Image (cartoon, rainbow, N blue to C red):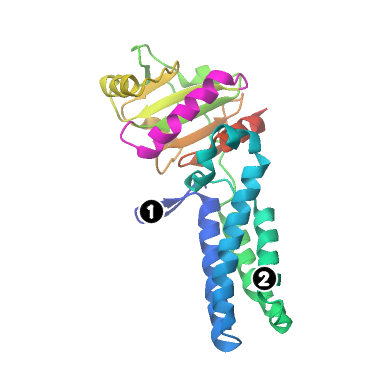
């Protein structure tokens, strides 16, 4: 499963797991604040913030060189990028400091923490796995120059297929980074499959943004997205040399996640 849909809302599995885990943690902590000690309410919110900040900083430090080149991305949390181990470490330190004069309360903190962990693992287990979908059948796809494109051309080496559209804000935000990686990475071939738009619209966007892309495919009917059951845009598909889908990232992708996905194809 590559996404969790609730009405019009679509979540990547890991983000949905994080949301439910945090909700379980806060709810059970609120129960403790009413039944055991009122201090658990403030502790829970402080611990949640400590975990998020610690996890983000842990990720940033792990990829320090990349973030030094683009410091503003430290705050681009919508791209993902959290180191759970670092977040847990900071949360434990915060708890130790918060209850340093009330050690009798520390054992109670295990309950909401265990509930959060259980919820996260349960959601990940239920949504784990990406079907090894084969490439779409040939026909109906054209390059920006108007030449026919056959998906089987991607077989033989790792490929990254980006499903995008000019009207999609996250697509537009990630595109310059995608172009940069495509130009400077020889480990995979990049193909940008536009969903549902015509050549004139695509060319107008590329000109206005001063972007040069070598492998743009026009998919006017959005067949690629339906074939891979992509529930939103942008979607980044990581395809092995055998033409089978290995993984999919739904939503705006970070440089680190993109490079990590390529490494896993090797």
- The first of marks 2 and 1 along the sequence is 1
Please determine whether, in this image, residue 77 is positioned above or below residue 246: below
The C terminus: image quadrant: top right
Q: Position of residue 184 (x, y in %)?
A: 57, 20
Report how far apart the C-alphas of labels 2 and 1 lie in the structure: 34 Å
| Nearer the observer, 57 or 231 | 57
Q: Main secondary structure of the magenta part?
A: helix
Residue visible at 36% across and 38% down in the picture:
169
Query: Where is mark 1, residue-wise?
Result: 9
Q: Position of residue 177 (x, y in %)?
A: 49, 29
What's drawn in magenta, residue-wise?
Answer: 166-187
Please determine whether, in this image, residue 150 is positioned above or below residue 81: above
Magenta segment includes 253? no
Residue visible at 65% across and 54% down in the picture:
84
Q: Position of residue 136 (x, y in %)?
A: 46, 28
Instruction: Give the side of residue 205 with respect to residue 217, left or right.
Output: left
Examine the image and state in which quarter residue 170 appears: top left
Please determine whether, in this image, residue 243 is positioned above or below residue 3: above
| Nearer the observer, 191 or 90 | 90
| Nearer the observer, 13 or 53 | 53
Q: Is residue 135 visible?
A: no
Checking the image for residue 95, the label placed there is 2
Q: Are marks 2 and 1 in contact (CB under 8 Å)?
A: no
Quick one: label 2, few (<14), some, or many (20+) residues within 10 Å? some
Residue visible at 55% across and 58% down in the picture:
18
Q: Is residue 176 visible?
A: yes
> Which element is circle 1 on?
strand
Q: How many marks?
A: 2
Q: Position of residue 119 (x, y in %)?
A: 59, 65
């Amino acid at each position: 499963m590559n996404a969790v849909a609730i009405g019009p809302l679509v979540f990547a599995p890991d983000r949905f797991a994080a949301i439910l885990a945090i909700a379980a943690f806060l709810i059970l902590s609120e129960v403790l604040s009413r039944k055991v000690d009122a201090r658990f309410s403030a502790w829970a919110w402080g611990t949640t913030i400590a975990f998020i900040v610690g996890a983000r900083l842990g990720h940033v430090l792990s990829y320090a060189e990349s973030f030094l080149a683009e410091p503003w991305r430290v705050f681009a949390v919508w791209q993902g990028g959290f180191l759970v181990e670092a977040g847990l470490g900071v949360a434990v330190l915060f708890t130790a400091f918060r209850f340093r004069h009330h050690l009798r309360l520390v054992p109670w903190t295990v309950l909401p923490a265990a509930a959060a962990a259980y919820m996260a693992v349960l959601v990940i287990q239920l949504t784990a796995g990406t079907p090894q979908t084969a490439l779409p059948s040939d026909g109906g796809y054209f390059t920006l120059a108007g030449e026919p494109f056959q998906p089987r051309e991607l077989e033989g080496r790792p490929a990254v297929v980006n499903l995008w559209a000019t009207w999609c804000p996250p697509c537009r935000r990630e595109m310059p980074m995608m172009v940069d990686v495509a130009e400077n990475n020889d480990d995979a071939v990049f193909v940008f499959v536009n969903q549902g738009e015509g050549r004139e619209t695509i060319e107008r966007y590329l000109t206005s943004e001063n972007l040069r892309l070598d492998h743009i495919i026009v998919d006017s009917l959005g067949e690629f997205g339906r074939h891979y059951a992509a529930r939103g845009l942008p979607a980044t598909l990581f395809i092995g040399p055998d033409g089978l889908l290995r993984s999919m990232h739904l939503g705006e992708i970070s440089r680190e996640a993109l490079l990590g996905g390529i490494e896993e194809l090797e």
